[in-house]
Image (tube, grey):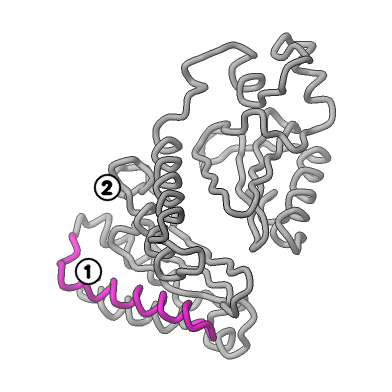
Amino acid sequence: MDLLRLALERGATARAAVGHLTSLLEEHGQGGACEEGGDWTYENGFLLADAGEAFVVETAGTRHWAVERVPPGMGRNISNGLSIRTGVESCSAGLKELCVAKGWWDGEGPFDWKRSVGAGGRAHAKLDVRGRERAGADHLAAAAGRVSDGSLPAGDVAGWLGWMAGVLRDEESGICFRSTHGFMSTGSQISWLARGGGHTASHFFTAASDPLVACYKRWTFGDPAAAAAGDGLAGDGGSLALWRRWRSIDLAGRSVPEAMRRALLEIEAEAVSAAERGGASEFSGSVARELELISSFAV
């Protein structure tokens, strides 16, 4: 994750962030424990996007990587595994030569990153798209169909945000990692990166581990008034207190009444409406309202 933080800090565009990330990976490598008090490790995959294009960056071993460009108008998802196949735009120095030397690629046909690195060059059932990755791909395909038939126009802010929130709340597929499943997400985020049209880029955070109960709240960069209220880099806008409150509710096994759930969704709807209008962030105000709503759940 340090690679991701540094790439986002140093890269003004998605392509620049990819360059920083892969350079750091080749120079310093990746590794270390992924949990406190344990020795669990894994390799990383990243989706980096701006309003013009996006990239998938996947890693193997300590320093090897591959990049796939996602052009405008196309969708892409990743989920805990290698997903890049033959659409490799660039890769780490020496990777292809290593795959030839290991017998994972013949050096003649298209270079298949997942088959070469993930399956030793062999056809394997694990090459198929499965689980959460399959569910995500199905969601993207359904959205593409709606774009084609006109029911989800490219500039429909509320439509796209509502669709994405629905995807992230898909518990059946495993995309939504609720705390009730034992292994949970830390939080959930949606970003609307408008390409022209006068819309301000908007970022929506649950500030809670469970998007099925918490609502998405809007945050924007570069607004001095919002920063003074705690919606900037100098403060958390009350989000840590909210996360802790929701976590205590989860640990106590409390359920959210339907009336409260509807009230939380009203906060979310107002945040979406604000994204349509553009303008200042109202993150800290939304957090305060949500904290007030769930105050009866203090444990």
Which of the pair 71/120 is nearer the observer?
71
Which of the pair 238/24 is nearer the observer?
24
Q: Is residue 86 left or right of residue 273?
A: right
Q: Position of residue 146 (x, y in %)?
A: 40, 54
Element at label 1:
helix
Prevailing SS of the magenta stretch: helix
Position of 86 relative to 211 (above/below): above
Q: Position of residue 113 (x, y in %)?
A: 66, 26
Position of 39 relative to 285 (above/below): above
At label 1, which amino acid type do we have? Answer: Arg
Q: Is residue 278 left or right of residue 95?
A: left
Which of the pair 288/46 is nearer the observer?
46
Q: Quadrant of residue 159?
A: bottom left
Badge 2 crowding class, 10 Å Cα cut-off, few under 14, some 14 to 19, many 20 or more, is: few
Q: Position of residue 84 (x, y in %)?
A: 62, 33
At label 2, which amino acid type do we have? Answer: Thr
The image shows a total of numbered marks equal to 2
Q: Is residue 272 magenta?
A: yes
Which residues fall within the magenta stretch? 255-281
Q: Quadrant of residue 291?
A: bottom left
Position of 175 relative to 297 (above/below): above
Which dot, 1 or 2, sits closer to the camera? 1
Q: Is residue 298 magenta?
A: no
**Residue ID at (54%, 48%):** 75
Which numbered marker is on residue 100?
none
**Residue ID at (20%, 75%):** 296
Separation of marks 1 and 2 at Cα, in angstroms: 17 Å
Element at label 2:
helix
Q: Which residue is mark 1?
A: 261
Q: Is residue 57 left or right of residue 259?
A: right
Q: Which residue is mark 2?
A: 180
